């Protein structure tokens, strides 16, 4: 059963967004590679451990963790992304990975995991207090949590540069509250700590990590990427063709100063979060 308040996210990740992530899985994993290395290293998966990968998507981190751990369960609401994860596990001969289609905010597990892990899969809960309180119940006594989430969009060059360029040319967006579910929902550390504490987690740490993210081989590929993924892609959805053309021209000009970065990269800024029960 899923939490009805997550219905929008379930529709979103099973619609065009999920299909896009599946189609571009290789490219997105390449873009997030430095961040994956950092969070996997921090999580310190050990042989024999049972791990829950929350919002596992197309399975990149699940499959990586499964090489060390005893077993990995990937939970996600996106059917197409889970299918991709399961297929990748099969192709790689990884037998200790299982994909579950369910809402992590209220799916019941026993106290069976040593580690709750996530790469950008925990910021989309309509009721994060309830979600983390529920997820805590799936940990064995002494179990731990390790996830990565975005810091403020203004600290993230990959979001700030495209937004600043395109926004003046696109229809006004409904104002987004700082606590609304979405990629930047855990940017505010005080809020994040409050949610984890109220969910029953202790020893909470959040460490800033900055990296360069590979957006494509060159300016042209990076321009295509920013129209397809991230905040500008969502803003463009409701725009007319004329507005889109102006936004793309502005986007292209804003990305030009970075064109000598080959491959084309923009900065990413995340929190590496850990906690225990
Ligand atoms: C930004 S994607 C990240 C996917 C994957 N972890 C990765 O790094 O490639 C966010 C993921 O969280 C999943 N998600 C969102 N809300 C969820 C929920 N309530 N329960 C389980 N998964 C959820 C989405 O379906 C999506 O796969």
Image (spheres, grey):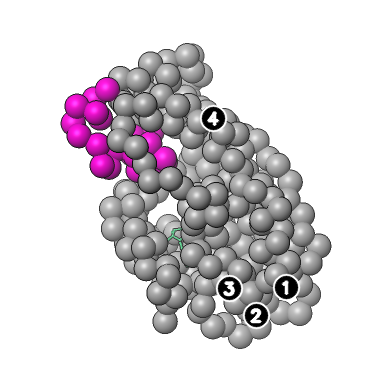
Could you say whether the residue bearing mark 3 is in a helix, strand or loop? Answer: helix
Looking at the rendered structure, which numbered label has been put on residue 157? 4
Mark toward the start of the polypeptide (4 vs 3): 3
Task: Give the labeled residue for mark 3.
Answer: 130
Q: Which residues are magenta?
A: 226-246
Q: CA distance from mark 1 to mark 3?
A: 11 Å
> Alpha-carbon distance for marks 4 and 2?
37 Å
* Residue 107 rendering spot, x and y as whole percentages: 50, 79
Q: Which mark is residue 137?
A: 2
Asked if the residue under mark 3 is in contact with the one under mark 4, i.e. CB atoms within 8 Å, the reply is no
For this orientation, the residue located farthest to the bottom is: 110
How crowded is the residue under tag 4: few (<14 C-alpha within 10 Å), some, or many (20+)?
some
Q: Seen in the image, is 273 located left or right of residue 260?
A: right
Q: Earlier in the sequence, mark 3 or mark 2?
A: 3
For the residues labelled 4 and 3, the Cα–Cα distance comes to 32 Å
Q: Would you say residue 237 sits in the magenta stretch?
A: yes
Looking at the rendered image, the disc whose residue lies closer to the viewer, 2 or 1, is 1
SS at mark 1 in the image: loop
Residue at left offset 37%, top offset 68%: 7
Tell us which disc is closer to us: 4 or 3. Answer: 3
Name the residue carrying label 1. Answer: 200
Q: Is mark 2 within 8 Å of ligand 1?
A: no
Label 1 neighbourhood size at 10 Å, few (<14), some (14-19), many (20+)?
some
- Estimate the x, y position of residue 169 in percent, counting from the top left: 32, 26
């Amino acid at each position: 059963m899923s939490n009805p308040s997550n219905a929008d996210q379930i529709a979103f990740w099973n619609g065009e967004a999920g299909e896009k992530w599946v189609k571009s899985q290789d490219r997105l994993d390449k873009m997030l590679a430095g961040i994956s290395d950092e969070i996997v290293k921090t999580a310190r998966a050990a042989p024999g451990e049972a791990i829950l990968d929350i919002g596992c998507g197309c399975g990149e981190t699940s499959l990586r963790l499964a090489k060390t751990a005893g077993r990995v369960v990937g939970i996600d609401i996106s059917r197409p992304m889970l299918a991709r994860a399961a297929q990748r596990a099969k192709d790689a001969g990884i037998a200790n990975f299982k994909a579950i289609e369910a809402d992590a905010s209220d799916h019941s597990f026993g106290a069976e995991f040593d580690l709750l892990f996530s790469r950008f899969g925990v910021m989309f809960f309509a009721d994060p207090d309830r979600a983390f309180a529920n997820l805590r119940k799936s940990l064995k006594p002494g179990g731990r949590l390790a996830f990565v989430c975005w810091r403020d969009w203004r600290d993230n060059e990959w979001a700030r540069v495209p937004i600043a360029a395109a926004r003046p040319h696109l229809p006004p967006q409904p104002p987004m509250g700082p606590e609304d579910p979405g990629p930047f929902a855990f940017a505010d550390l005080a809020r994040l700590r409050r949610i984890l504490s109220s969910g029953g987690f202790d020893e909470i740490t959040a460490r800033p990590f900055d990296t360069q993210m590979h957006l494509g081989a060159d300016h042209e590929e990076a321009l295509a990427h920013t129209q397809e993924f991230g905040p500008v892609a969502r803003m463009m959805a409701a725009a007319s063709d004329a507005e889109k053309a102006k936004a793309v021209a502005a986007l292209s000009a804003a990305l030009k100063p970075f064109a000598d970065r080959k491959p084309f990269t923009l900065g990413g800024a995340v929190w590496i979060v850990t906690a225990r029960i």
